[in-house]
Image (cartoon, coloured by chain):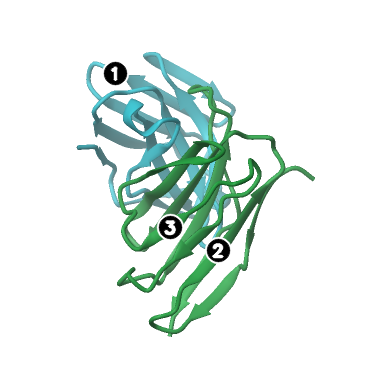
Amino acid sequence: GQNIDQPTEMTATEGAIVQINCTYQTSGFNGLFWYQQHAGEAPTFLSYNVLDGLEEKGRFSSFLSRSKGYSYLLLKELQMKDSASYLCAVRVNQAGTALIFGKGTTLSVSS
Amino acid sequence: DGGITQSPKYLFRKEGQNVTLSCEQNLNHDAMYWYRQDPGQGLRLIYYSQIVNDFQKGDIAEGYSVSREKKESFPLTVTSAQKNPTAFYLCASSITNSGNTIYFGEGSWLTVV
């Protein structure tokens, strides 16, 4: 079976840094993705990791350790508009190019 | 503009009725997907198709059916056999290179009344 775990909720203040963790146990691994989803809207792509290490893209960074089945999304200089759900998703060989998603982490940013 | 179009945005269905959700993409993507989203459940895979005239069941295919007669179209039928169909439905597409992300349509809200 496939299992992807994320914290359900997190809170932070404007200007701070927050780290959202994701652990996975899957049959096969072919990449890990992070998406952002505002309430009632479609998810939008944030980052992709397939090799171990850190990928940086502006205020957002994502890290992967395949041996530990672990990833995190790091958000810097938080803004109010970063209040959203953050979805961790894994591509597994058994589902073609489909992604298997965790339940998402709802981040609330306050002033 | 290139993208994925889902229709209708909002749909109400009476119990016992089948309903079909449309998904069209003009991105020339080979692969298409349907996900369902319930509060607190994340996105769950219903069906996916890697190529025209072929599709595979995802984790929660029971009570749903799909077809893939054209590359750009992947309609989802929610049948009366689906016991709890009220949800947010998301269609997505991608090229079949494993390193590429999938892109989502705007979603369809289905409510059973």
> Which residue has dot 3 on it?
B65
Residue A91 against residue A13 in the figure, above or below? above
Find residue A1 and report its image quarter.
top left
Chain letter of disc 2 in the image: B
C-alpha distance separating marks 3 and 2: 11 Å
C-alpha distance separating marks 1 and 2: 37 Å
Nearer to me, A83 or A100:
A100
* Residue A7 in the figure: left or right of residue B57: left
Tell me which amino acid carries mark 2: Leu
Chain letter, green in picture: B
C-alpha distance separating marks 1 and 3: 35 Å
> Which residue has dot 1 on it?
A66
Chain letter of disc 1 in the image: A
Tell me which amino acid carries mark 1: Arg
Q: Are marks 3 and 2 on the same chain?
A: yes
The answer to whether residue A111 is visible is: no
Residue B63 against residue B68 in the figure, above or below? below
Nearer to me, A9 or A86:
A86
**C-beta proximity under 8 Å, tags 3 and 2:** no
Dot 1 crowding, Cα within 10 Å, few <14, some 14–19, many 20+: some
Residue B92 is situated, as x and y percent measured from the top left of the image, at: 54, 45
